[in-house]
Amino acid sequence: MIPRRRHNQNHIVSKTISCKLHAQRQHSCSNILYMSEQEDQSSITDLTSLRKLVSQATTLHTKNLSASNISIQQLTSRITDLQTESSQPNFWEASNSQRNEVVTRELTKYTKLKEQMELWDRLRNDSIDALELLEELLGDEQSNNDDDDEMIQLTMEECESSATQLLELSTKYELATLLSGPYDDCSSTRIILTAGAGGTEACDWVSMLYRMYTRHATYMDMKVSTIEESAGDVVGYKSVELLVEGTNAYGWFKGEKGAHRLVRLSPFNANNKRQTTFAGVDIIPILDEEVIKDVDIPDKELEVTTMRSGGKGGQNVNKVETGVRIKHLPSGIAVKCTEQRTQGLNKQLALTRLKAQLIAIAQEEQLQNINDIRGDVVEASWGKQIRNYVMQPYKMVKDGRSSYETSDVDGVLDGGEQLEEFIGAWLRWRRSEEEIKKEEEMKLEV
């Protein structure tokens, strides 16, 4: 009985192990099938995403080419003509200095644009060719070896890299084409930040905007320097003036003009209460002498006062009143200059900046005469804000004109890509408003 019992036990154990092995084989086979299905589904998803990415990039590229109204062949011809002109023996003579500047500027502009267009074409062709090769590899049912898998992966990466780069460059060029105002191509601009309602909190808000615009100018490959700053009583600044130099500097920052509102739990409030504060941002182009030479402002319309500049420069700037402040009486606009070491140079520079500011404002308001300007001063107070930065009780930055918004407040204040999105949204909004206005005018004419 005992041997028979052992035989029965062995039979049961053997049967159990056999069942387990069979179950494991089935589970392993099902896992392989599931993983294969997942890989196929992943490939389909990746291919669909790549098709969408390539389509977006090539569509925007085609749109930009149509908007530019110039081909690579035309650019090459134009560059050749400018190079021929600049190679003439009398081109660099002092009497021809104005033409020298124009030719040099245009030659740099067209050469850069040609290089950009050649890069766009190369990226477009690379992304399209990679996508076609990828579709061919994925459509081949016999391609199941490791070499083909590696080829598919490399082709996907190449396609994604080329299309992403093309989309980014095309987006930047699209924004550049929106800078179509009379002075949008001005390469130098002044940014003036002024503390508004809010006391100490407003001075700290100015320092935050100071950091944001300084970082954004650097992010946009522009040169930024501080012209003048007035420290607050406790922290921050009462006012700061920046000089930004770079391609289309004025056109890019022009939309930032206005009151900026901040809502947060104030670190300067003993009860840690939520506080609203404001700061004014003014954007003023620095125009060429050729633009402002015909602007004549009578002396009776100007109020000139002098002051000590202070700061570095020795006894000359600390004891002699070298600083100059000029106020345009009809409009109430004032410009202060303390950069130069003599009163005469500061007065000349202040008058030049005042003329540039009046011209820019007259153009914005579509006025025929600068005397029609009446106090175009940024009012940093409630109800005048162009953008809200809310940090409490929730996080949101929203532009009151374009309605563009984001919850990434820190990203915007860091002055990087998020602020670029806001400026781009404003440029697109302005273009749409101009198109609507033109359509309404055409309907009225009919």
Image (cartoon, rainbow, N blue to C red):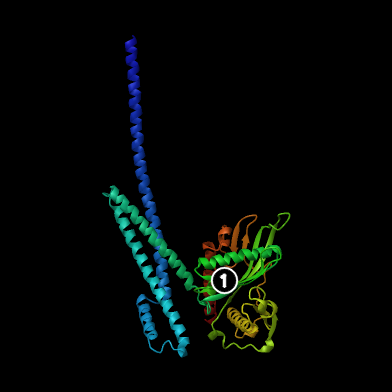
Q: Quadrant of residue 216?
A: bottom right
Q: Residues within 10 Å of mark 1 (few under 14, many from 20)?
A: few
Q: Which residue is mark 1?
A: 225
Q: Nearer the viewer, residue 231 or 150?
A: 231
Residue 159 located left or right of residue 195: left
371 up-or-down from 312: above or below: below
Q: Position of residue 429 (x, y in %)?
A: 54, 69
> In the displayed image of the protein, which residue is found farthest to the right?
270
Residue 306 located left or right of residue 48: right
Q: Position of residue 209 (x, y in %)?
A: 61, 65
Q: Position of residue 55 (x, y in %)?
A: 39, 62
Total labels: the figure holds: 1
Q: Quadrant of residue 377?
A: bottom right
Q: Is residue 260 visible?
A: yes
Q: Secondary structure at mark 1?
A: strand
Image point (32%, 56%), residue name: 134
101 up-or-down from 155: above or below: below
Image point (47%, 90%), residue name: 95
Q: Is residue 193 visible?
A: no
Residue 24 located left or right of residue 357: left
> In the displayed image of the protein, which residue is found farthest to the left?
142
> In the displayed image of the protein, which residue is found farthest to the top?
1
Image point (63%, 85%), residue name: 344
